[in-house]
Image (tube, grey):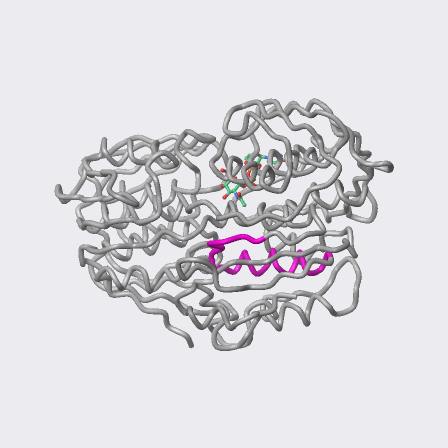
């Protein structure tokens, strides 16, 4: 149950769960998930978001651009760390407490998934005014990740490793295409096979079975996958014997997951490098873990300071996880300095220089900041070649930026951005999370009014974005029809 032990979201509007207001979708989630059991448990957009326009995702954000941002922005816990950490809660019958969990739509979707599988999820006030989740899974009552949740959020597949490790069986619907390209799960399945599972396909569902439990093995990934590494790590934690994960992802979110698993009693070494070794243990126990800071949110606000010619202090984030981004911003002429408890970002140069960027797995430049950086380059004093190597079809922000006056030409996986002096406000719409926020950045820099439609994408990944920006001088408001 996603029970509010205390009304945690009251501390909040601040505490972050903006989607929880004014209706209490937590209740709606529970009701929907507890409906008729079966593979396609009906969890609708409305049930996750309540009934107002705000919750059905029809909200829009109105921005009047041109004001340099000044102030302090606290960085939230990382969505991409919190999601696998929540899945890790399925690995033990004791309680896993996760602190600094951001209040986001994706967290609600994962909550619904955990509850569907038999976990209890309780939201409680955490330290420093943050929100914590207490996840308790005495037994897993379901082994299938239902289609409606997987379709809504790809990270739902992260429950497979824990469910398989704990019960010897896990099922998931075959994921369809998604807005940023075809994203298969073959690497996740390869990892399970290497740990002794048998994979079969039945009625559109992939079934992994390991009667008698998983056994340690050597998992060699042909390409780097964050999600597959996380699933492999969680499954191997409870497998019999030693496992090696070769060509593992090195993202900070992997390191955070390993830290939490170790606190739960797992034996893991090599996290943060390309080779991770896991010695399986018989059982894991409860723990308390603080979610790492959201490096993508921090990078986004660093670009907000840069594009408006402003100055922001981002608290709660270190330089190392966004070193590649800091390098590119510095090359462009933005000053980024480490300060106590955070980073200070200042653009004193007005229009900055054009800098080429290629997305790469960590420690390279993150694909999740590509759209935002492209927006920054759209108003640079020069040109920039932006190459996307992780996902196909991740340039959907380009036509919208062009409607605002940007000069961008896409050729296959590269976009040539020729900087213009000024963007012009316009009604725009985006089809994924990072594309949406790139349009917010464009709006902050543009002349006049920008309306960003389909705000529900933003609510998936940016906690209290309009509040954080307004506090730094931006003219930005949410319009609810
Ligand atoms: C995670 C992040 C996402 C980020 C991405 C890359 C979460 C919840 N999401 O997504 O924000 O953009 O990492 O940094 O953490 N692939 C396969 N087969 C698979 C799995 C992946 O071919 O079985 C491919 C994908 O299509 C993609 C590449 O591998 O081209 C990398 O994807 P992956 O690292 O798995 O991304 P996610 O874990 O889904």
Residues 342 and 409: in front is 342
User: To which quarter of the image does residue 244 belong?
Assistant: top right
Q: Position of residue 289 (x, y in %)?
A: 53, 47
Q: Position of residue 153 (x, y in %)?
A: 59, 52
Predominant SS along the magenta part: helix
Q: Position of residue 240 (x, y in %)?
A: 77, 30
Q: Is residue 312 magenta?
A: no
User: Taking 199 as reference, is 90 above or below it?
Assistant: below
Horizontal side of residue 311 vs 28, given as left or right: left
Q: Residue at x 17, y 44 (%)?
A: 347
Which quarter of the rendered picture does the C terminus lie within? bottom left
Q: Residue at x 46, y 48 (%)?
A: 78
Q: Position of residue 70 (x, y in %)?
A: 19, 55
Q: Is residue 106 magenta?
A: yes
User: To which quarter of the image does residue 284 belong?
Assistant: top right
Which quarter of the rendered picture does the N terminus lie within? bottom right
Residues 7 and 246: in front is 7
Ligand 1 visible in quadrant: top right
Q: Residue at x 63, y 66 (%)?
A: 44
The residues colored magenta run 97-117
User: Taking 391 as reference, is 294 above or below it?
Assistant: below
Residues 190 and 343: in front is 343
């Amino acid at each position: 149950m996603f029970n509010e032990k205390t009304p945690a979201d009251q501390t909040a509007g601040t505490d972050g769960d903006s989607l929880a207001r004014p209706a209490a979708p937590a209740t709606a989630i529970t009701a929907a998930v507890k409906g008729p059991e079966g593979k396609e448990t009906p969890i609708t957009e409305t049930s996750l978001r309540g009934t107002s326009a705000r919750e059905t995702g029809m909200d829009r954000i109105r921005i009047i651009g041109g004001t340099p941002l000044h102030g302090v922005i606290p960085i939230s816990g990382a969505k991409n760390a919190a999601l696998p950490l929540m899945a890790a809660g399925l690995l033990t019958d004791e309680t896993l407490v996760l602190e600094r969990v951001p209040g986001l739509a994706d967290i609600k979707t994962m909550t619904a998934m955990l509850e569907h599988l038999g976990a209890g999820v309780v939201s409680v006030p955490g330290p420093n005014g943050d929100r914590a989740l207490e996840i308790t899974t005495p037994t897993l009552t379901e082994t299938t990740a239902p289609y409606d949740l997987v379709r809504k959020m790809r990270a739902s597949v992260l429950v497979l490793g824990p469910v398989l490790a704990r019960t010897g069986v896990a099922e998931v619907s075959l994921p369809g295409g998604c807005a940023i390209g075809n994203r298969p799960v073959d690497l996740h399945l390869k990892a399970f096979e290497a740990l002794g599972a048998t994979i079969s396909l039945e009625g559109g569902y992939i079934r992994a079975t390991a009667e008698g439990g998983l056994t340690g093995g050597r998992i060699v990934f042909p390409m780097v996958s964050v999600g597959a590494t996380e699933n492999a790590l969680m499954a191997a934690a409870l497998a019999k014997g030693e496992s090696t994960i070769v060509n593992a992802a090195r993202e900070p979110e992997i390191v955070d997951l390993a830290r939490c698993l170790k606190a739960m009693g797992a034996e893991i070494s090599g996290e943060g490098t390309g080779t991770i070794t896991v010695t399986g243990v018989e059982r894991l126990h409860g723990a308390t873990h603080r979610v790492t800071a959201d490096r993508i949110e921090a990078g986004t606000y660093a670009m907000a300071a840069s594009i408006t010619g402003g100055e922001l202090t981002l608290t709660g984030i270190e330089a190392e996880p966004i070193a590649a981004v800091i390098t590119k911003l510095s090359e462009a002429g933005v000053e980024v300095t480490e300060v106590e408890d955070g980073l200070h970002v200042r653009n004193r140069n007005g229009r900055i220089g054009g800098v080429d960027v290629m997305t790469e797995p960590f420690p390279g430049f993150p694909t999740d900041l590509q759209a935002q950086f492209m927006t920054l380059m759209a108003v640079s004093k020069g040109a920039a070649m932006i190459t996307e190597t992780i996902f196909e079809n991740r340039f959907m922000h380009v036509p919208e930026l062009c409607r605002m006056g940007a000069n961008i030409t896409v050729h296959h996986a590269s976009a040539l951005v020729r900087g213009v002096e000024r963007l012009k406000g316009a009604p725009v719409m985006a089809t994924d999370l990072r594309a949406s926020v790139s349009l917010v950045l464009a709006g902050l820099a543009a002349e006049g009014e920008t309306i960003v439609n389909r705000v529900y994408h933003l609510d998936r990944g940016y906690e209290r974005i309009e509040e954080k920006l307004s506090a730094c001088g931006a003219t930005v408001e949410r319009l609810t029809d």
